Image: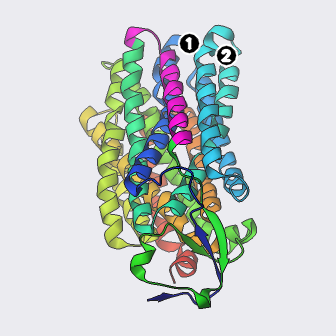
Amino acid sequence: MLKLDKPCRLVYDAPMTKKQLTPRTLIALCWFVYFASYLTRQNYNAALAPMLEDLGAAKSALSLAGTAGFVAYGVGQPVSGLLLRRVDARRMIFLGLCASAVCNLLLAVCPSWVPGPRLPLAMTAVWCANGFAQAMLWPALVQFMARQLSPADYKRATIHVNIAGSAGTVTVYLLVPLCVALSTWRWVFVFAAAVALIAALFWRRLSPVDSGQLTVDSEKLTMHKDQLSTVNCQLSTAKPVSMRKLLTGFGLAPILLAVALQGVLRDGVPAWMPVLITESYPAFTSVKSVLTAAVLPLFAIVSLQITGSIAKRINHELRSAAWFYAAGALAALGLGLCVTRWLPGSVAFMALLTGCMHGVNLVAVCQLPARFGRYGATGAAAGIINAFVYAGSALSMLGTALLAERFGWQATVWVWFAVAVIGTGIFVLFTKKARKSLYE
């Protein structure tokens, strides 16, 4: 028997007007939503090399849109997380998908509508709006899955949803050369918008109503453990913690810094890999380099399965993150020794580095927020942590461009190595308070 030792709020499924989905079907639906979100978010990075050739703009000018998108996404994350205390997660996800589809269509027509020197600014404005639309998706999806799925199914869902992101990235990197060969890179954004609208319609039609809430006296509540696996519920303190308490009371500060550094590597390496290959190995055209870059998200899919199994054995998100970061540092060291000299080795080490960062993302960004469920802050924690990831991503877009332009790719890769070493040290040395507050 399982007894609760303090008053709590039981979050339960509200009565349904449609047939209840099985956990497997619900995970598949969330997979498709996240797949569509990556199509509409990562396509700018994937199309960057062809856009540089077609538009004739400087790397720093076009990277401004990617930076603005990451900044808007990061700023919108905690806002969306707090809004989830008042707004239905289902509705937020639907609106976010629709808004992102519109932004992708606008970006596709920008070169026709705004020619000349104003084009980078117009693209930046559109992609900034897309960042805010995308920010509506992740906190809502995390809260939705945490409420609708059992703890075991939730951890399984985080792995599959992350695989959906990698699958979306692979699709984009394969789609860009196809669109460039047949017509233009603009069709990448049109295709992504169409998939996002389809996902929005499926979500609106099939997703179950978000959970309601019921306050109960824990002294009168007793459950068998096997009942907990069949009831979609989340137990937490009666009153959700404040934003101030969330930021200062759980030792989050070093974790937020570490996940920001993880964002630098997870998104910066794949985004600039086609350009790195094109400039470091002149025999490769931009189209060939984009195809080569598809290796990274393909390997990420495999690495998520591997890191998910490792994390399950360790059963401690912070310790798992330290191990994955350390492996990423070794991969960055290997990349530093190979870049500009040996193409197969460079691609292999970049794949290993991004795969390790996806492992860090899985445990620290996707699974760790569920630890805040007992404090009524799953969505808020997910939004804040993910915001710092994309703060790092925004820094990587513009920062990598400036480093590469001024110092070359060799120096840029050694900066990536330093970032991985610092991230490892943070998870090893500065997460003691978080371990006590979330695991004891």
Q: Main secondary structure of the magenta part?
A: helix
Residue kind at label 2, given as amino acid type = Leu
Residue 270 magenta: no
Residue at the (69%, 21%) spot, across then down: 122
Which one is nearer the viewer's eye here, 201 or 407? Answer: 201
Label 1: how many Cα within 10 Å (few below 14, some 14–19, many 20+): some
Disc 2 from disc 1: Cα separation: 9 Å
Which residue is tagged 2?
A: 119
Residue at the (26%, 39%) spot, across then down: 345
In the image, is residue 179 above or below residue 17? above
Which residue is tagged 1?
A: 55
Which one is nearer the viewer's eye here, 179 or 124? Answer: 179
Residue 333 location (% of width, % of height) = 35, 50
**Residue bounds of the magenta highlight:** 181-205
Labels 2 and 1 touching (C-beta < 8 A) = yes
* Tag 1 secondary structure: helix
In the image, is residue 405 above or below residue 358? above
* Tag 2 secondary structure: helix
- Image side of residue 32 versus residue 247, left or right: left
Residue 203 magenta: yes
